[in-house]
Amino acid sequence: MTINREEQRQYDRLSPSYFAILHDPYRKVYYRFATLPQSLEEFKNNVSQHPAVVILDENFKKIGQSILPKDKGLQFHTMMVGEDGLYINQVPFEENKMVFAIYSLTSKSN
């Protein structure tokens, strides 16, 4: 069976996709990065996929998930963890400048 390029692209966009895992030693968690699946309508209208972060405890048990904004120009190939939180590179407005969005982990109260 042969799958053409457009069928592969549709399959990729309609399915969840997981990629990097980062360890956060300050909060003793792991962050697993993903893109959420699109609806067929979103795919046909070429809407960007929603990025998400799955939060895992030290035993890799899922303890949370956060959907990140897709309109901030987040670049998931340049990320790091620091004392202040999770740093994700954003598309800069100025040349020769790196800009990071900082996300902090908070507890959800009942």
Image (tube, rainbow, N blue to C red):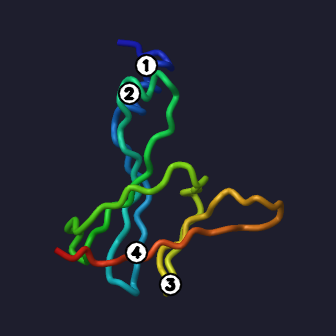
| Residue type marked 1 | Glu
Q: Earlier in the sequence, mark 1 or mark 3?
A: 1
Give the vertical position of 98 relative to 17 (above or below): below
Name the spot of residue 43 as percent of width and height, x first: 44, 27
Residue 91 position by quadrant: bottom right
Q: Seen in the image, is 61 located left or right of residue 81?
A: left
The circle on residue 84 is 3
Tag 4: amino acid: His
Q: Amino acid at mark 2?
A: Tyr
User: In what element is the residue under mark 4?
Assistant: strand
Position of the C terminus, as image quadrant, is bottom left
N-terminal label among 2 and 3: 2
Q: Position of residue 89 (x, y in %)?
A: 61, 64
Residue placed furthest toward the right: 95
Q: Residue at x 47, y 72 (%)?
A: 103
Name the disc covering residue 11, or none: 2
Instruction: Count residues near mark 4 (Cα–Cα under 10 Å), then give few for <14, some for 14-19, many for 20+.
Output: some
Whether residues under marks 1 and 4 lie with C-beta atoms below 8 angstroms apart, the answer is no
Disc 3 residue type? Asp
Name the residue tied to disc 4.
23
Q: Is residue 92 left or right of residue 53?
A: right
How far, Cα to Cα, is label 1 from label 4?
35 Å
- Name the side, left or right, on which 45 lies relative to 108: right
Reading the image, the residue beneath label 1 is 7
Identify the image quadrant of the N terminus.
Answer: top left
